[in-house]
Image (cartoon, rainbow, N blue to C red):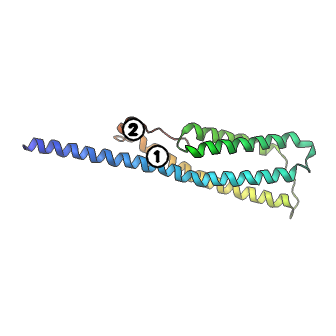
C-alpha cells in the first residue's frame, strides 16, 4: 500500500467515524425530546383532572354561566386529545403545534370563566392547586423547549446538516 492509499483510507475512516458519531448525537437529542415530554404530559393530565374538579364544583354555583362551563369542558377535552396525540410523537412538529394551539384555546376559555372563591373554601383550594399546576407545567414546558431547541440547533450545524436529509431527521416544534 502506498502512502496516498493509507491517507485515503484514514480519511474515509475518519469521515465514517464522524458520521456515526453525528448520527448517534442526533438520535440521542431526539430521545431527549421524548424523555422531556413525559413530565409535560404528566402535568397536562394533572391540570386536566384539577380543571374537571373545578368545573364540577362551579357548575351549581354558576348556573348562569353553563355555556362557558361547557366551552371550558370542551377545551379541556381538546387539550387532553392533543396531548395524547403528542405523547405518541413528541418530536412531530404538527402534534406539538396542535397541543400548543389547544392549550391557548383552553387558556382563553379559562380567562372567560369567573371563579368565585372564598378563603378556606374548596374552590380556593382548587384554585391554589391549579396555580401550582400551571407553574409546574410551565417549568416542564421550558425543559421540553430547551431539548427541542438543542435538537434543532444540532440539525442546522454544518456538517451534521449533510446527514439530516439522508436519515430523515425533521425539526421539532416548541410548546
Task: Locate the C terminus by quadrant.
Answer: top right
- Residue 168 in view (yes/no): yes
Label 2, residues with CA under 10 Å away: few <14, some 14-19, many ≥20: few
Camera-side residue of 145 and 76: 76
| Residue drawn at (82%, 50%) of the image | 55
Q: Is residue 137 left or right of residue 106?
A: left
The image shows residue 146, relative to residue 97, as above or below, that is below
Residue 25 screen position, x and y as percent: 39, 49
The residue carrying mark 2 is 167
Instruction: Please identify the residue farthest to the bottom as the structure is shown.
Output: 120
Asked which quadrant contains residue 12, the reply is top left
Element assignment for label 2: helix
Q: Looking at the picture, does residue 46 appear above or below residue 167? A: below
Q: CA distance from mark 2 to mark 1?
A: 15 Å
Please, is residue 130 above or below residue 151 in the view? below
Q: Residue at x 80, y 40 (%)?
A: 71
Please give the residue where the numbered disc 1 appears in the rendered image.
Answer: 151
Residue 107 visible within the image: no
Residue at disc 1, secondary structure: helix
Between disc 2 and disc 1, whose residue precedes? 1
Amino acid at each position: 500500500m502506498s502512502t496516498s492509499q493509507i491517507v485515503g483510507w484514514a480519511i474515509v475512516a475518519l469521515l465514517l467515524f464522524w458520521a456515526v458519531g453525528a448520527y448517534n448525537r442526533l438520535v440521542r437529542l431526539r430521545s431527549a425530546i421524548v424523555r422531556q415530554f413525559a413530565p409535560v404530559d404528566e402535568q397536562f393530565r394533572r391540570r386536566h383532572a384539577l380543571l374537571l374538579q373545578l368545573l364540577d364544583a362551579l357548575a351549581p354555583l354558576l348556573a348562569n354561566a353553563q355555556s362557558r362551563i361547557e366551552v371550558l369542558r370542551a377545551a379541556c377535552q381538546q387539550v387532553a386529545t392533543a396531548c395524547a396525540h403528542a405523547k405518541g410523537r413528541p418530536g412531530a412538529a404538527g402534534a406539538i403545534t396542535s397541543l400548543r394551539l389547544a392549550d391557548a384555546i383552553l387558556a382563553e376559555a379559562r380567562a372567560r370563566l369567573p371563579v368565585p372563591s372564598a378563603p378556606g373554601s374548596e374552590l380556593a383550594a382548587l384554585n391554589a392547586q391549579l396555580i401550582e399546576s400551571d407553574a409546574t407545567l410551565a417549568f416542564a414546558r421550558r425543559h421540553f423547549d430547551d431539548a427541542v431547541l438543542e435538537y434543532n440547533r444540532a440539525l442546522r450545524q454544518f456538517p451534521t446538516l449533510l446527514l439530516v436529509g439522508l436519515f430523515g431527521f425533521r425539526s421539532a416544534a416548541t410548546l
